Amino acid sequence: MGVEVVVEGLSKSFGKQAIWRDVSLTLPAGEVSVMLGPSGTGKSVFLKSLVGLLKPERGRIVINGTDLVRCSESRLYEIRKMFGVLFQDGALFGSMNLFDNVAFPLREHTRKTEAEVRRIVLEKMEMVGLVGAERKLPGEISGGMRKRAGLARALVLDPEIILCDEPDSGLDPVRTAYLSQLLIDLNAQIDATILIVTHNITVARTVPDNLGMLFRRELVMFGPREVLLTSDEPVVAQFLNGRRLGPIGMSEEKDQATMAAELAHREAGHADGAPDEDVRGVVPQLEPTPGLPPRGAVRRRKDRVMSIVHTLPADAQQGIVASLTPEEQERYGVLAANAGGPALTPSPVPRVARLPETGRHSRGGGDA
Amino acid sequence: MTAPGASFPGAGALAEAGKLFALAADVARSTFRRPFQFREFVQQSWFIVSVTILPTALVSIPFGAVIALQLGSLTRQIGAQSFTGAASVLAIIQQASPIVTALLIAGAGGSAICADLGSRTIREEIDAMKVLGVSPVQRLVVPRVLAAMLVSVLLNGMVSVVGVMGGYFFNVILQDGTPGAYLASFSALAQLPDLWISEFKALIFGLIAGVVAAYRGLNPSGGPKGVGDAVNQAVVITFLLLFFVNFVLTTIYLQVVPAKGS
């Protein structure tokens, strides 16, 4: 099973320019998390800090009891063997063909025979749909193929933590959907902790168990997906809906004047292309391909989330409870807890009682 | 990542120098870490030889000739023609040859190393390698630096021979020097340590060229243009360091090793 990654009070700056400050979050073991954020908010920097490629000035990143910010270089190389990282452009070795690229970690770190290496490499290549392209050089294939080959290389040592830097950038929506499915299937098969950094809303809404957002040099929020998907935070609402109206501007922040002007345009009937519907709300999560084992993370997360559900905002609570099957609601004693739990806001109670009848979100899979 | 207390002028340069030495120390340490990348070492040596051998030979002939001609006319003015051989051969072996070798190693080999590592860095290959748990210093930099050192030493031998032969040719054929005097004065003044210091210099210059090229290649200032700038800087920095180190080594040598016959 994957391992937990605990980040505490992490701050990073380049010279005088702070990238983000005081980021604290926990990537729960074996769960899929997504970090959202507008371009240029340091998402990639965050990801590189997690593997120790960049050293944050303050804070801790603890994996298996080792603080990556302060451990020795040799220890860092040991810890890194637990990671599989998919870089933005695949980061394949330009002088090797795809087969050698994918085989590289095996040849470096294991004593497997060439026949075994071949078997494992071909298996991973098939997983990402690259059979037949083994002899091609990275320069000869498309960006999407490079990305998939990069993923195959990241997976070849059966990592416990998988980090993906914008797996969707440069991919069409269909391939992005396939890649999302692949990541969920992987999580079902090897139970690795996965962190995806992206600004793709579809990925953010359907893939993760946990969702976070970086903006304005800090972590806006991080928690169970329902919390962010139902959030009233203006930044989150604007980002999820991909609108111009809101605090995010072309260059990171927007001043009051621009915001007022945009609002005035909209009042005057300027069609800014943003759809009127609000895509916020909890949508069904992507499930593993039928035939694969169920994701262990789903059940673990449900237990974890239900134990803290009373601390979450009302909309998130509603979304979480609505996604439970009637049996699960009974198992977690949601209704009973609502009646007696003093920490709960009173509003969800009647809605929760109503939801099983409407059956809007309850599905056979009982996914959270 | 600038140093936290970098406020006084020149702090940036000091920090850069520190990082350069840190890389050199890292290279030294990684050299003895198994497994040694023998294949990469051979490939890199071959590559550096292939780009440097012809230019070096072509440069060393006129270089030897210029020294021989200059010394030839000078010694004739002061009536010491018999020492032309010794002076020109010593000048070629001790000074000209290591410098010519190093300039070409830095200019042809170092710039290629720097460009190669630089483009790998901006394509995130280096990061990917680190993340895959493989040290790029051990895997890529050590074989390159050792190759630069080996080729530098070997080329230095070749440059010495070609330079001395060029000098002999110009002195004896064009300036009507006496072959016997040329060779006799040579063996009267030159000694074996002169050859050692020459090779030692070549070794050190190869090290400098390799480490500086690798350092600039691993730290380009962002984007493809940064790689171009890094290559440029690598060559310039190497040249500056070469002449300074040459000055230091020559001073020490002249102090430590007594001249023959004195």
Image (cartoon, coloured by chain):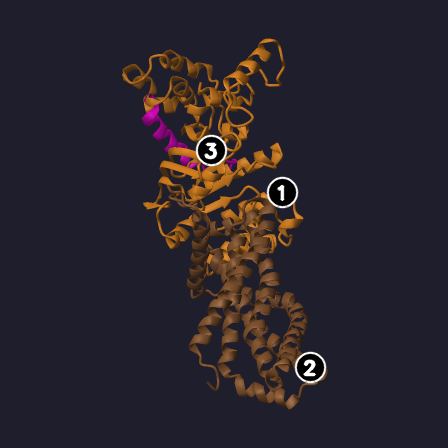
Chain colours: A orange, B brown
Per the image, the residue denoted by label 1 is A143
* Closest to the observer, B89 or B84: B84
* Closest to the observer, A216 or A316: A216
In x, y percent, where is residue A17? 45, 35
In x, y percent, where is residue A98? 60, 52
In x, y percent, where is residue A97? 61, 54
Q: Is residue B57 magenta?
A: no
Q: Amino acid at mark 2?
A: Phe
Which of the 4 image quadrants contains residue A13? Answer: top left
Q: Where are the magenta residues, as a range?
A: A287-310
Per the image, the residue denoted by label 2 is B169
The crowding category of the residue bearing disc 3, from other C-alpha atoms within 10 Å (few below 14, some 14 to 19, many at least 20), is many
Kindly indicate whether the residue at mark 2 contacts the one at mark 3 (C-beta within 8 angstroms): no
Q: Which mark is residue A34?
A: 3
Chain at numbered mark 2:
B
User: What residue is drawn where x is 52% and y is 55%?
Assistant: A104
Q: Are marks 1 and 3 on the same chain?
A: yes
Q: Secondary structure at mark 2?
A: helix
Q: Are marks 1 and 2 on the same chain?
A: no
Outermost residue toward the top in this view: A268
Chain at numbered mark 3:
A
Spatial CA span between label 3 and label 2: 74 Å
* Closest to the observer, A367 or A251: A251
Spatial CA span between label 1 and label 3: 22 Å
Discs 3/2, front: 2
Spatial CA span between label 1 and label 2: 60 Å
Q: Amino acid at mark 1?
A: Gly
Location of residue B169 with respect to A7 vertically, above or below: below
Image position of A318 (left or right of A244): left
